[in-house]
Image (cartoon, rainbow, N blue to C red):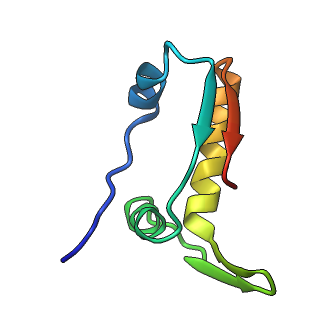
Amino acid sequence: MAVYCVPKSDEHILSDVAASMNILAVACPSCANISYYLSRKDNGPIMKFTLKGIEAQSCKKEMHRLVDLLTNNGKNVESSY
């Protein structure tokens, strides 16, 4: 069995949240992280091991990008990263 997440375009995301002003963005550090790594052809590490645990690098980059996208479009965003 395999799980694969397909990222939506920025336009699709903005359309989905058009009626919302407050957004909670939560990312899965497993399936989504791997999917973002593969779909975006990320050249960096997929995971980073720290004293606090494992950080999902691809998901972290994507969440920061999405927070910027949404806040630049007038949304209030709380993120898991």
**x and y percent of residue 33 in the render?**
48, 66
Q: In the rendered image of this protein, does residue 20 appear above or below residue 52?
A: above
In the displayed image of the protein, which residue is found farthest to the left? Answer: 1
Toward the viewer: 78 or 48?
A: 78
**x and y percent of residue 12 in the render?**
38, 28
- Name the residue located 60 percent from the left edge and 79 percent from the top edge: 47
Q: Describe residue 39's horizontal placement relative to residue 55 as left or right.
A: left
Q: Describe residue 35's horizontal placement relative to residue 71 as left or right.
A: left
- Name the residue located 46 percent from the left edge and 71 percent from the top edge: 30
Q: Describe residue 46's horizontal placement relative to residue 15 as left or right.
A: right
Q: Quadrant of the C terminus?
A: bottom right
In the displayed image of the protein, which residue is found farthest to the top? Answer: 19
Toward the viewer: 65 or 20?
A: 20
What number of labels is visible? Answer: 0
**x and y percent of residue 41 in the render?**
44, 65
Q: Quadrant of the N terminus?
A: bottom left
Toward the viewer: 31 or 69?
A: 31
- Name the residue located 55 percent from the left edge and 76 percent from the top edge: 46
**x and y percent of residue 25 in the render?**
58, 43
- Name the residue located 67 percent from the left edge and 81 percent from the top edge: 48
- Tell me which corner region of the image, top left, top right, bottom left or bottom right, holds residue 13: top left
Q: In the rendered image of this protein, does residue 16 appear above or below residue 40?
A: above
Q: Describe residue 80's horizontal placement relative to residue 7 as left or right.
A: right
